[in-house]
Image (tube, rainbow, N blue to C red):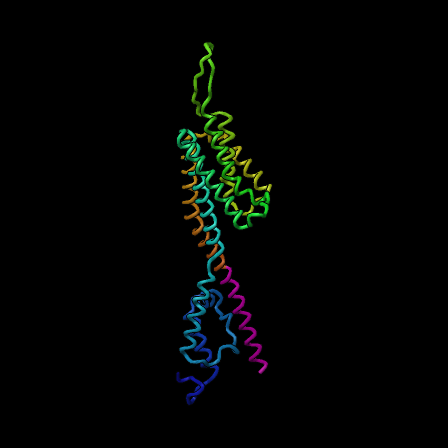
Amino acid sequence: LRHHPDKPGGDVDTFRILNRAKTVLSNQKLRREYDLVGLDLEDDEGEHQDDGSSSTGEAGESEDDEGKGKTESVMSHLASASLAAVLQVAVRTVLMGITSTLISRYTVLTYLAFGALLFVSTRIYKGLKQSLGPESKIELSAMKDVLSPILIAFGLYCMYRGRRFLISSEDETEAKVYVEWSWTFWFGEMLVMAMFMNNSVEQKSPLIVVVFMTISFIFSLIMKGRFWRYLTLLGFLAVLAMLVVLVFPIMEMVLESIVDEKMRKVGEKIRAHDARMRNIKKSSK
């Protein structure tokens, strides 16, 4: 405090420089910028007058907290979004695998699923009627949420029927034959898969529906209701999630090191220019 302007022999400029140096050293964001560039780029002589050492420390801490809240990198956001997308696909894959390999195979489970889906559709319809009013008409766009469980139930029925066929023999007796896969089963699996994907997005459009139907068309031909194929897909998604968790931080560190190196080179040029400007200013005096 001996350089404080109110003290005998105090100097305003010296006190301001020391006060600002303390602020930079106590703030991680400002200190990192100074380490890279070699200059205090945010220093403004008109904004750093004497407000007391305690207020300066509090300002540095608040600025540091604000900096911490804003320093989430683009790579971190990409990693979070990618991991969330992979986990969402994994959840849909588990639901689709249970529906295709387990529920559609047994009659009791199939009818229980029918009842649950119809109940959900009825509840959604009643909720829409209550929100819009008893005398108002529900538009077709709002009915999509009501029809979604019904379409899933229809697809489940196609999968159920696609595993069972009645074959008449020559003596006019009928026998029920169970098969693992048929085109009826494929249609049901494709429909349920497309509805699962369509329900995972909030903004729906005809183009998105076409894309989901195309993906479902291809994957249902690959899966064919096989448990081990769904298990393989889940394993692939698990590996992909691990890669997202491991690769994105590495990419972030690599990019950060590249940016730091560029900033150091820019800092050298800025310091050289600053030194020239100071020399010119001194010579003009």
Which quadrant is the N terminus positioned in?
Answer: bottom left
Q: Is residue 269 left or right of residue 252?
A: right
In the image, 268 versus 149, the foreground residue is: 149
Measuring from the top left, give residue 76's x and y in whole percent: 46, 54
Q: Residue at x 40, y 85 (%)?
A: 2
Total residue callouts: 0
What residue span does the magenta drawing correspond to? 262-285
Q: Residue at x 45, y 9 (%)?
A: 171
Residue 268 belongs to the span the image colors magenta: yes
- Depicted 159 relative to depicted 169: above or below: below
Asked whether residue 8 is in view, the answer is yes
- Depicted 248 relative to depicted 118: above or below: below
Measuring from the top left, give residue 24's x and y in whole percent: 44, 71
Farthest residue to the bottom: give it: 8
- Depicted 17 relative to depicted 185: above or below: below
Farthest residue to the top: give it: 171
Q: Residue at x 45, y 25 (%)?
A: 163
Asked whether residue 228 is in view, the answer is no
- Depicted 168 relative to depicted 90: above or below: above
Which quadrant is the C terminus positioned in?
Answer: bottom right
- Main SS, magenta residues: helix
In the image, 156 versus 85, the foreground residue is: 156
In the image, 247 versus 109, the foreground residue is: 109
Measuring from the top left, give residue 34's x and y in whole percent: 46, 68
Residue 246 belongs to the span the image colors magenta: no
Measuring from the top left, give residue 159's x and y in whole percent: 47, 29
